[in-house]
Amino acid sequence: MTPEEALFEGLKSLDVKKPTAPTEGSPVEEVMYAKGDPDPSKPVTLRNLFTHPDTHPVVLDFAMLKSFGLDWHRWEPETLFDEVKEVFQTQISELCKHKLRALQVIHASPLVTAKWHVFEKVAHALNGNFPDFEAVQKLSLEELYAAVDILDTLKKGLSYSDEVKLYMAACILDEDIFFVPPPLDLIQVEVSQPYYHCNDCGNEESALFHDGICSNCSDRLHPEQGLSLQPKNKLGRNTTVTVRFDPAPVAKRWEELKGMAYNVFAPKMDDMADVQCGRLLAARDYMNIRRKQLAEQLTALKGWLGAA
């Protein structure tokens, strides 16, 4: 497939990415479009494509593909930024530089879905944040929703490593969320934290990467077993698997609320499911606003991109 064919195939595939609920009047939208310098409420145009704080990463990706083909994926930063300045006759904001570098990692390296620290920094850039490479920057629920959604738009069928899934689950559990609708449903097992209970000795261990045989009863960790971790005897099979964080009550409430506008939802603050659904509605709105931004920016630039 030529770069031009890739461009048009990508543009056509975006038609299926629609907001899942209305966002007009959402408090999330008000926060995102709060006045700043530069002003994020101003529209993205070809002139400010590389300086506007809300230029969507997918729009940047299409602009780079149209101008440079696939070659730019492996350019050194100095070459990348110099070429953009020369071809587009523009300056590049520091935030945009981070977005471009994140896009390079997504296209040229498998690490974004394999290593949690790479995923974290790329996800921050996709959300319009400045990555800090000297500190851990836990992603919020909203940022995780938008990042996974954008990554799915850029590269269909991505598979995340256990390491990255556990990182995402840790971020979500830190916000006391037990249920994750699409596109984060891929980590529901990690969020639920399944564990087994040995009915013989009372031992409990995580069941995420476990075969359900009690390590204590079976002596699988005995020094004689070495690194094989094979059971030393026939004991430890009488186990029961359950979850630490049951998603069912929240999932049931979410089915009732998922199409509701966030600004009309009045959660019962003493109801765990309602409180969690309130956070999920905010995350849904943030993801949908990013989808709207993408659609609006592609419409504004469709003449230049050549989109039908």
Image: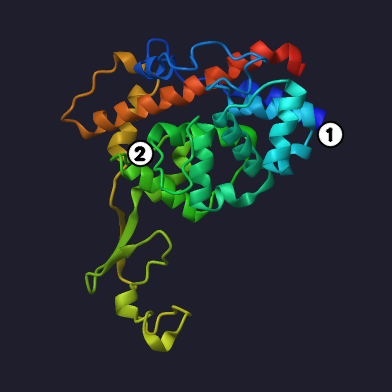
Q: Looking at the image, can residue 46 be seen?
A: yes
Residue matched to label 2? 179
Residue matched to label 1? 2
As helix, strand or loop, the secondary structure at mark 1 comes to loop
From the viewer's perspective, is 16 left or right of 42?
right
Q: How many marks?
A: 2
Q: Quadrant where the C terminus lies?
A: top right
Say what amino acid the circle numbered 2 marks: Phe
Q: Residue 282, position in %: x, y?
A: 36, 25
Q: Which mark is residue 93?
A: none
| Outermost residue, bottom side | 224
- The residue nearer to you, when weighing 88 against 121, is 88
Q: Residue 14, position in %: x, y?
A: 64, 24
- Mark 1, Cα crowd under 10 Å, few <14 / some 14-19 / many 20+, is few
CB under 8 Å between discs 1 and 2: no
| Outermost residue, left side | 270
- The residue nearer to you, when weighing 256 against 179, is 179
